[in-house]
Amino acid sequence: MFKELDPILHSQLRLAVMSLLIGVKEAEFTFIREKTGATAGNLSVQITKLKEAGYVDVIKQFKENYPQTICRVTPQGVRAFENYVKALQSYLPK
């Protein structure tokens, strides 16, 4: 039987963000924006949704007098991503 897909991760941009963060554990907002090709506004909204779900932590700080936003995947986010991948695999023929 098919497993239900996590609606938070089923968004293309949120899935792309999580895929990036799974590989690097944390990344600057600008890096994520460049890699996904998303606009800053849309990316900000999607990262907020991931944060509200507990999948990422967002750290806002200053680096050389410039604002810097770091996104870090949480243990809950790692579990959710792994479960999402497993659920997707249930859709593939064996």
Image: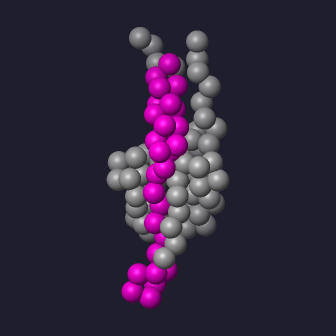
Q: Which residue is outermost to the bottom?
A: 65
Magenta stretch contains residue 80? yes
Q: Residue at x 61, y 66 (%)?
A: 41
- In terms of depth relative to the viewer, which is nearer, 38 or 5? 5
Magenta stretch contains residue 32? no
- In terms of depth relative to the viewer, which is nearer, 19 or 57? 57
- In terms of depth relative to the viewer, which is nearer, 59 or 45? 59
For the C terminus, give its image quadrant: top left
Q: Residue at x 45, y 13 (%)?
A: 93
Picture coordinates of residue 85, whole percent (x, y): 47, 31
Q: Is residue 8 above or below residue 48?
A: above
User: In the visual, does 29 lie left or right of 7?
Assistant: left
For the N terminus, give its image quadrant: top right
Q: Is residue 27 above or below residue 90?
A: below
Magenta stretch bounds: 62-90
Picture coordinates of residue 36, whole percent (x, y): 45, 56
User: In the visual, does 23 lie left or right of 3?
Assistant: left
Q: Residue at x 44, y 60 (%)?
A: 32
Q: Quadrant of residue 2?
A: top right
Q: Quadrant of residue 8?
A: top right
